[in-house]
Image (cartoon, rainbow, N blue to C red):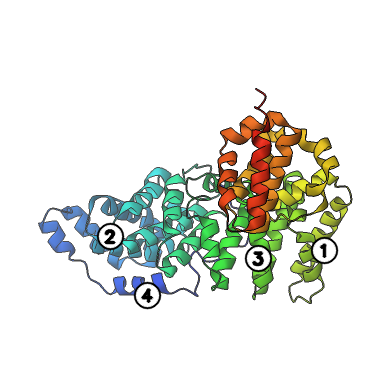
Amino acid sequence: MVVDKNINIAPVVAGHNNYLEDQTAAVREKTIPWEGYQKAALITEDELKQIRQFEKVSVEALKESGANYSLLLLSLLQKLARNDTIQNILVVFEDKILGFSDREEILAQLEPSLLFGTFINLLSKDDEYVQLKSAKIVAVLALERSNTAVDVDPSPVFSWLTGKFADPNPNVVDIVIQILQTLLAVPSYRLAFYKTRGAMNGFDLIDAIKATSSNPQMQYQGIYCMWTMTFVQEIAADIQRSYEVIPLFIDIAKAAIKEKVVRVIFSTVKNMINLAPQENIIPMLGNKLLNLSETLAARKWTDTEITEDLEYIKEELAKNINSLSTFDEYSSEVKSGKLEWSPPHLSEQFWKQNASRFSEKDYELVRVLGRLIATNTSPIVLAVAAHDIGQYVKYAPVGKKFVQDNGTKTQIMQLMTHENSDVRYQALIAVQKLMANSWIS
């Protein structure tokens, strides 16, 4: 694992959220009855002796004996079951081991699978504090051990994190996003998180960002995670196609109060243009990102990085808009999801020339139109999408089978009872075109 040196790493849990630290302070006040545990045979006499020695150890002696004490704590975490005891040991490990100035030397002596595995296993405990503290420790360890050749599988941690995005407690969501933010400083973890089931679908990171609209700090942290991931070319090329993040970024940038939110959005956009221009520039143009960039570039920003990024984005988008064909413009509009009655939709010449291209890339445009018909609520979007499917099958009858097989025909038929008269009309015409001739096999 290697940490990306170009990324500034914030504290694993920043000072603005005292939720975890307040609980930690309370745990420190508790006394664990170690003698009672020894009498109950939960720990050995030798372990009790080591615990008492550890409690009195000096800072100087810790450098010499820190690895042995770490092994003792890890062993206790594995064998003991009481949540309050585990809480106490976690705090001791964080305070004494991770809080030690020469902790790198101590941690380097420990077997990574034992070190990471112990805390990862605690994520399944039925105690919120144990889970959060263990996840935080894993994030710290990932950074501390980042320069070793050790390859620790982060998937259990990412699965746990994604399950917490929908937690009803906003403090938990805040801490979880901060932990993710720290873990993604390790480049090899970025694609692993992106591909984690539930990370980018279900109630995911994107939904968590949407839910933080009233909390600029949490919103920033969530988008920061996305920015970090877009340093990976595969992610930069896929994230708009799969999750349509550009409209989200535009909406947030328009409403943003904090400059750092705007900065991280356009830093992410810049990455997407740099690493995957072919996949991203057309949907950016279709979503009118050039217009927004021009508007925002005219403002005075205290952060010069925002101005520089906006100028770069403006230049790149303007350079490409002049080379777009009519079909590129149409494709850009469809992929943006913001359909309107622009000239290509109403041009018979456009459909004669381009209908056959709708089967390219595994019917990509047909799929997008079908998804808009199934999920969008805007009458104009529904009307235009239904119209376009009708025009497509009129000039490319071979596509009728695909439109039926992927369910789009059924969705259009349902629009025939829509409350909007234009939607009903366009759906009726599209269905007539679909039924006009049997499809070509």
The numbered mark, 2 or 3, whose residue comes first in the sequence reads: 2
Secondary structure under tag 1 reads helix
Q: On the image, which quarter does residue 314 sit in?
A: bottom right
**Which residue shows up at 83% across the image and 42% down it?**
348
Q: Which residue is mark 4?
A: 22
Q: Nearer the viewer, residue 61 or 144?
A: 144
Q: Which residue is mark 1?
A: 311
At which x and y percent is residue 93?
A: 36, 61
Whole-Å distance between the Cαs marked 2 and 1? 53 Å
Q: Nearer the viewer, residue 12 or 351?
A: 351
**Which residue shows up at 67% across the image and 24% down it?**
440
Tell me the crowding category of disc 4: few under 14, some 14 to 19, or many 20 or more residues within 10 angstroms, Cα based: few
Q: Specify the amino acid type for callout 3.
A: Asp
Secondary structure under tag 4 reads helix
Whole-Å distance between the Cαs marked 2 and 3? 44 Å
Q: Nearer the viewer, mark 2 or mark 1?
A: 1
**Which residue shows up at 75% across the image and 68% down it?**
306
Horizontally, residue 399 falls left or right of residue 78, namely right
Whole-Å distance between the Cαs marked 3 and 4? 35 Å
Tell me the crowding category of disc 3: few under 14, some 14 to 19, or many 20 or more residues within 10 angstroms, Cα based: few
Secondary structure under tag 3 reads helix
Q: On the image, which quarter does residue 206 sit in?
A: bottom right
Q: Which residue is mark 3?
A: 251
The numbered mark, 3 or 1, whose residue comes first in the sequence reads: 3
Is the Cβ of the residue at disc 3 closer than 8 Å to that at disc 1?
no
Q: Which residue is mark 2?
A: 86
At which x and y percent is residue 6?
A: 67, 57
* Circle number at residue 199: none
The numbered mark, 3 or 4, whose residue comes first in the sequence reads: 4
Q: Specify the amino acid type for callout 4.
A: Asp
